[in-house]
Amino acid sequence: MKTQAYAATAADKPLGPYILERRAPRFNDVAIEILYCGVCHSDLHTARNDWGWTNYPIVVGHEMVGKVIAVGSGVSRHKVGDHVAVGTMVDSCQHCDQCHKGEEQLCREGNTQTFAGADRITGEPTMGGYAKHIVVREEFVLKVPAGLDLAKAGPLLCAGATTYSPLRTWNVGPGSRVGVIGMGGLGHMAIKLAVAMGARVTVLSRSPAKEADATSLGADAFLVTSDTAAMAQATSSFDLIIDTVPTQHDLNPYIPLLDVDATLCVVGQIGPLDELNSLPLLLGRRRVAGSAIAGVAETQEMLDFCARKNVLPEVEMIRMDQINEAYERLERSDVRYRFVIDMASLGQAEPVAA
Ligand code: NAP
Ligand code: ZN
């Protein structure tokens, strides 16, 4: 099936219209008309080849919400007309211990990423959600619970799942003291989810202008990270800190803010960090950890939790042809707090490449 999409063709070129070939549904596949797709900083990292593994052309996007338009003969979980979602993974080996536990993101053979991955059967590059359609095996298609606003739900699939998972791993609940570094797409979801779990949430941000928003999202406190006196006062005051900063940075100012046995979980920077001083780790038996996305079951649990608790991202809806401008704003941390592309806007322009 040919479908309209938007692709990056080089690290230094703007994204533009592109015709994408989607496979015909296999027996266990679901074909989806994409209605909305969130814009993650990982899309930008990939389009610009920040991680060095991008092959062009590439269609990014891994926060999709849409409608089932066809199913393979063996599909039992979804039917035509259902509202469904696709996140950051589209396949995994399905037989290792991690897949059996429902932690497909930790698949021993590596999960198949929604974009910049390789199809496990054909080896073809996987292409993401800046498109009108996608075809995905049924196990990796999530159900959008009734009542969740389709136009806003997309960012839950990555920003939501990626922050929900560490909150659950470290048993955040009523009374937990949670810090969130960086108030962007992931960060603002971390705030909302932790607040909904009953935690006391502090935002650690470079941007004093975001304080009012942090408060309205339910945060109890706001720490400007350049304010050394306020940072010093916060020593030993967190059970968990989730770090969403998207570039190489220094963790050393944050480690002393952890209480004894507490954890700083990196979810933002994928790659090197500045050199770490182990002394505050040893003295407080503190930990630095990492976490990537979430398994399928946990992602569904998060969607159901968000529907129950009425947790949704703050979104700025854009047209597909506004994506390059959106990337520039994302780079400047100038988004309140997640762009979502309305896919109805795609296809009005003529495709330029096939
Ligand atoms: P985003 O919307 O750009 O938010 C990042 C926030 O970090 C910014 O709003 C800003 O908040 C802060 N920040 C930005 N640059 C900074 C710098 N140089 N130093 C300190 N703080 C800085 O990005 P996002 O979509 O949330 O994604 C964040 C990162 O998570 C990206 O690198 C993305 O690739 C990664 N990611 C990881 C996973 C995973 O599985 N672990 C999943 C999805 C995304 P303030 O203005 O408040 O300081
Ligand atoms: Zn993402």
Image: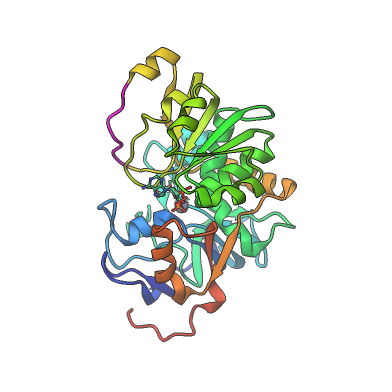
Question: Is residue 101 rendered to the left or right of residue 215?
Answer: left
Above or below for 329 versus 96: below
Locate residue 107: give its quadrant. Answer: top left
Q: Position of residue 227 (x, y in %)?
A: 45, 37
The percent coordinates of residue 192 (x first, y second) are 63, 45
The image quadrant of residue 201 is top right
Q: Is residue 302 above or below residue 87?
A: above
Q: 39 or 249: which is nearer to us?
A: 249
User: Which residue is nearer to you in this view: 211 or 63?
Assistant: 211
Query: Magenta stretch?
Result: 271-277
Outermost residue toward the top in this view? 283
Q: Main secondary structure of the magenta part?
A: loop
Where is residue 196 drawn, in percent x and y? 68, 40
- For the point 49% across and 64% down, which residue is it? 135
**Tell me, what colour scheme is on the image?**
rainbow
Kindly tell me whether residue 267 is visible in this rendering: yes
Q: Residue at x 55, y 28 (%)?
A: 170
Camera-nearest residue between 17 and 220: 220
Farthest-out residue, front: 229
Q: Which residue is drawn at the image coordinates 46% and 26% (left, top)? A: 232
- The stretch drawn in magenta includes residue 319: no
Asked if residue 93 lies left or right of residue 153, the reply is left
Foreground pick, 115 / 310: 310
Q: Is residue 107 depicted above or below 277 in this figure?
A: below
Of the 4 image quadrants, the one containing the N terminus is bottom left
Please indicate whether residue 70 sits to the left or right of residue 281 in the image.
right
Residue at 58 percent across and 61 percent down: it is 315
**Can you give x and y, in whole percent of width and height, for residue 122 in the image?**
34, 59
Q: Is residue 296 visible?
A: no
Image quarter where the C terminus lies is: bottom left
